[in-house]
Protein backbone atom coordinates (compact mmCIF):
# COMPACT_ATOMS: atom_id res chain seq x y z
CA UNK A 1 0.00 0.00 0.00
CA UNK A 2 1.30 3.46 -0.94
CA UNK A 3 2.00 6.01 1.77
CA UNK A 4 -0.25 9.02 1.54
CA UNK A 5 1.06 12.57 1.48
CA UNK A 6 -1.57 15.23 2.02
CA UNK A 7 -0.74 18.78 0.94
CA UNK A 8 -3.19 21.55 1.75
CA UNK A 9 -2.98 25.03 0.29
CA UNK A 10 -5.19 27.89 -0.75
CA UNK A 11 -6.29 28.43 -4.33
CA UNK A 12 -3.24 30.47 -5.37
CA UNK A 13 -1.44 27.37 -6.60
CA UNK A 14 -4.09 26.09 -8.98
CA UNK A 15 -3.48 26.08 -12.75
CA UNK A 16 -4.81 29.30 -14.24
CA UNK A 17 -4.86 31.62 -17.19
CA UNK A 18 -2.69 34.68 -16.84
CA UNK A 19 -2.11 37.81 -18.88
CA UNK A 20 1.11 36.24 -20.12
CA UNK A 21 -0.33 32.80 -20.91
CA UNK A 22 -1.31 29.75 -18.91
CA UNK A 23 -0.04 27.95 -15.86
CA UNK A 24 -0.75 24.47 -17.16
CA UNK A 25 -1.31 21.32 -15.10
CA UNK A 26 2.01 20.01 -16.39
CA UNK A 27 3.79 23.05 -14.89
CA UNK A 28 2.32 22.75 -11.40
CA UNK A 29 4.40 21.64 -8.45
CA UNK A 30 1.99 18.83 -7.63
CA UNK A 31 2.20 17.29 -11.08
CA UNK A 32 6.01 17.43 -10.96
CA UNK A 33 6.07 15.89 -7.46
CA UNK A 34 3.81 13.08 -8.58
CA UNK A 35 6.23 12.28 -11.40
CA UNK A 36 9.29 12.48 -9.15
CA UNK A 37 7.80 10.41 -6.30
CA UNK A 38 5.64 7.75 -7.99
CA UNK A 39 5.72 5.43 -4.93
CA UNK A 40 3.52 7.83 -2.97
CA UNK A 41 -0.09 8.76 -3.24
CA UNK A 42 -0.51 12.53 -3.18
CA UNK A 43 -3.71 14.20 -2.09
CA UNK A 44 -3.94 17.92 -2.80
CA UNK A 45 -6.54 20.15 -1.25
CA UNK A 46 -6.50 23.63 -2.74
CA UNK A 47 -9.19 25.56 -0.92
CA UNK A 48 -9.72 29.24 -1.60
CA UNK A 49 -11.14 31.68 0.89
CA UNK A 50 -13.12 33.85 -1.50
CA UNK A 51 -16.40 32.53 -2.78
CA UNK A 52 -16.15 34.24 -6.14
CA UNK A 53 -19.39 32.84 -7.48
CA UNK A 54 -21.25 34.30 -4.49
CA UNK A 55 -19.46 37.64 -4.68
CA UNK A 56 -20.23 37.94 -8.40
CA UNK A 57 -23.93 38.26 -7.60
CA UNK A 58 -23.31 41.43 -5.61
CA UNK A 59 -22.76 44.91 -6.97
CA UNK A 60 -19.13 45.93 -7.56
CA UNK A 61 -19.13 48.76 -4.99
CA UNK A 62 -20.51 46.42 -2.31
CA UNK A 63 -17.96 43.71 -3.15
CA UNK A 64 -15.16 46.28 -2.91
CA UNK A 65 -16.45 47.42 0.47
CA UNK A 66 -16.85 43.83 1.70
CA UNK A 67 -13.33 42.82 0.66
CA UNK A 68 -11.81 45.91 2.26
CA UNK A 69 -13.80 45.52 5.47
CA UNK A 70 -13.11 41.82 5.84
CA UNK A 71 -9.56 42.02 4.44
CA UNK A 72 -10.24 38.71 2.67
CA UNK A 73 -11.01 36.93 5.93
CA UNK A 74 -13.82 34.71 4.72
CA UNK A 75 -13.52 31.84 7.18
CA UNK A 76 -13.31 32.55 10.93
CA UNK A 77 -10.03 31.27 12.39
CA UNK A 78 -11.69 28.81 14.81
CA UNK A 79 -13.76 27.31 12.00
CA UNK A 80 -10.67 27.09 9.79
CA UNK A 81 -8.73 25.26 12.50
CA UNK A 82 -11.62 22.87 13.17
CA UNK A 83 -11.92 22.05 9.47
CA UNK A 84 -8.17 21.44 9.23
CA UNK A 85 -8.32 19.00 12.14
CA UNK A 86 -11.32 17.23 10.64
CA UNK A 87 -9.51 16.81 7.31
CA UNK A 88 -6.50 15.38 9.13
CA UNK A 89 -8.66 12.96 11.12
CA UNK A 90 -10.76 11.73 8.20
CA UNK A 91 -7.96 11.34 5.65
CA UNK A 92 -5.37 10.12 8.16
CA UNK A 93 -2.38 10.77 5.89
CA UNK A 94 1.08 9.33 6.48
CA UNK A 95 2.38 12.91 6.21
CA UNK A 96 0.40 16.16 6.35
CA UNK A 97 2.02 19.18 4.70
CA UNK A 98 0.71 22.64 4.07
CA UNK A 99 1.89 25.57 2.05
CA UNK A 100 1.87 28.86 3.85
CA UNK A 101 -0.31 31.56 2.40
CA UNK A 102 2.12 33.75 0.51
CA UNK A 103 3.17 37.03 2.05
CA UNK A 104 1.13 40.00 0.85
CA UNK A 105 3.06 42.27 -1.46
CA UNK A 106 3.09 45.97 -0.47
CA UNK A 107 0.61 46.92 -3.19
CA UNK A 108 -1.74 44.13 -2.07
CA UNK A 109 -1.61 45.34 1.54
CA UNK A 110 -2.45 48.87 0.35
CA UNK A 111 -5.48 47.48 -1.47
CA UNK A 112 -6.62 45.28 1.43
CA UNK A 113 -5.53 46.79 4.74
CA UNK A 114 -4.98 44.11 7.38
CA UNK A 115 -4.41 41.25 4.94
CA UNK A 116 -0.85 40.66 6.23
CA UNK A 117 -2.07 40.09 9.79
CA UNK A 118 -4.77 37.71 8.55
CA UNK A 119 -2.22 35.77 6.52
CA UNK A 120 0.01 35.41 9.62
CA UNK A 121 -2.96 34.19 11.70
CA UNK A 122 -3.93 31.49 9.20
CA UNK A 123 -0.30 30.45 8.70
CA UNK A 124 0.11 30.04 12.47
CA UNK A 125 -2.77 27.55 12.47
CA UNK A 126 -1.18 25.65 9.59
CA UNK A 127 2.17 25.59 11.40
CA UNK A 128 0.50 24.25 14.54
CA UNK A 129 -1.14 21.24 12.83
CA UNK A 130 0.91 20.43 9.72
CA UNK A 131 4.44 20.28 8.38
CA UNK A 132 4.43 23.83 7.06
CA UNK A 133 6.31 24.79 3.93
CA UNK A 134 7.06 28.46 4.55
CA UNK A 135 6.70 30.43 1.33
CA UNK A 136 7.73 33.78 2.81
CA UNK A 137 10.89 33.69 0.67
CA UNK A 138 9.03 32.97 -2.56
CA UNK A 139 10.74 35.20 -5.15
CA UNK A 140 8.61 38.07 -6.43
CA UNK A 141 9.28 36.74 -9.95
CA UNK A 142 7.23 33.67 -8.98
CA UNK A 143 4.13 35.75 -8.23
CA UNK A 144 1.69 36.98 -10.86
CA UNK A 145 0.96 40.65 -11.36
CA UNK A 146 -2.18 40.32 -9.21
CA UNK A 147 0.23 40.11 -6.20
CA UNK A 148 -1.37 36.90 -4.97
CA UNK A 149 -1.30 33.96 -7.39
CA UNK A 150 1.77 32.06 -8.55
CA UNK A 151 3.22 31.44 -11.98
CA UNK A 152 5.43 28.63 -13.33
CA UNK A 153 8.50 29.95 -11.45
CA UNK A 154 6.46 29.93 -8.25
CA UNK A 155 5.46 26.31 -8.87
CA UNK A 156 9.11 25.35 -9.41
CA UNK A 157 10.08 27.08 -6.15
CA UNK A 158 7.33 25.31 -4.20
CA UNK A 159 8.28 21.93 -5.64
CA UNK A 160 11.89 22.43 -4.57
CA UNK A 161 10.83 23.48 -1.06
CA UNK A 162 8.68 20.36 -0.75
CA UNK A 163 11.52 18.11 -1.96
CA UNK A 164 13.83 19.69 0.66
CA UNK A 165 11.22 19.03 3.37
CA UNK A 166 10.66 15.45 2.14
CA UNK A 167 14.39 14.77 2.58
CA UNK A 168 14.18 15.72 6.29
CA UNK A 169 11.59 13.07 7.07
CA UNK A 170 11.22 9.38 6.40
CA UNK A 171 8.78 9.10 3.54
Image (spheres, rainbow, N blue to C red):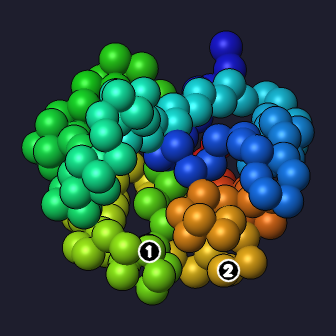
Closest to the camera, between mark 2 and mark 1, is 1
Q: Quadrant of the C terminus?
A: top right
Res 137 → quadrant: bottom right
- Where residue 35 appears, as percent x and y from the top left, is 88, 37
Residue drawn at the location 17% of the way across and 60% of the way down:
69
Q: Position of residue 103 (x, y in %)?
A: 45, 74
User: What is the quadrant of residue 39 in the picture?
Assistant: top right
Q: Secondary structure at mark 2?
A: loop
Please give left or right for residue 52 compared with residue 2 in the image. left
Residue 99 shows in this picture: yes
Residue beneath the point at 66% across and 59% down: 150
How many numbered marks have been drawn onto this rendered protein structure? 2
Q: Is residue 72 above or below residue 145?
A: above
Residue neighbourhood size for the residue with mark 2, other residues' Cα within 10 Å, grouped as few (<14), some (14–19), many (≥20)? few
Left or right: where 164 falls relative to 57 = right
For marks 2 and 1 on the same chain, the one whose residue lies earlier in the sequence: 1
Tag of residue 139: 2
Q: Residue furthest bottom?
A: 106
Helix, strand or loop for disc 1? helix
- Disc 1 marks which residue? 108
x then y, percent, for residue 37? 81, 39
Horizontally, is 77 left or right of 45 in the view? Answer: left
Amino acid sequence: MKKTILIITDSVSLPRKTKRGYVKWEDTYYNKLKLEFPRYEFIYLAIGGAKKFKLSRLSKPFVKFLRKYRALKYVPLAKYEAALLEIKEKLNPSHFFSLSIIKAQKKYELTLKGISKNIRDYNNILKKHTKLIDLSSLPVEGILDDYHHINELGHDYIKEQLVIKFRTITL
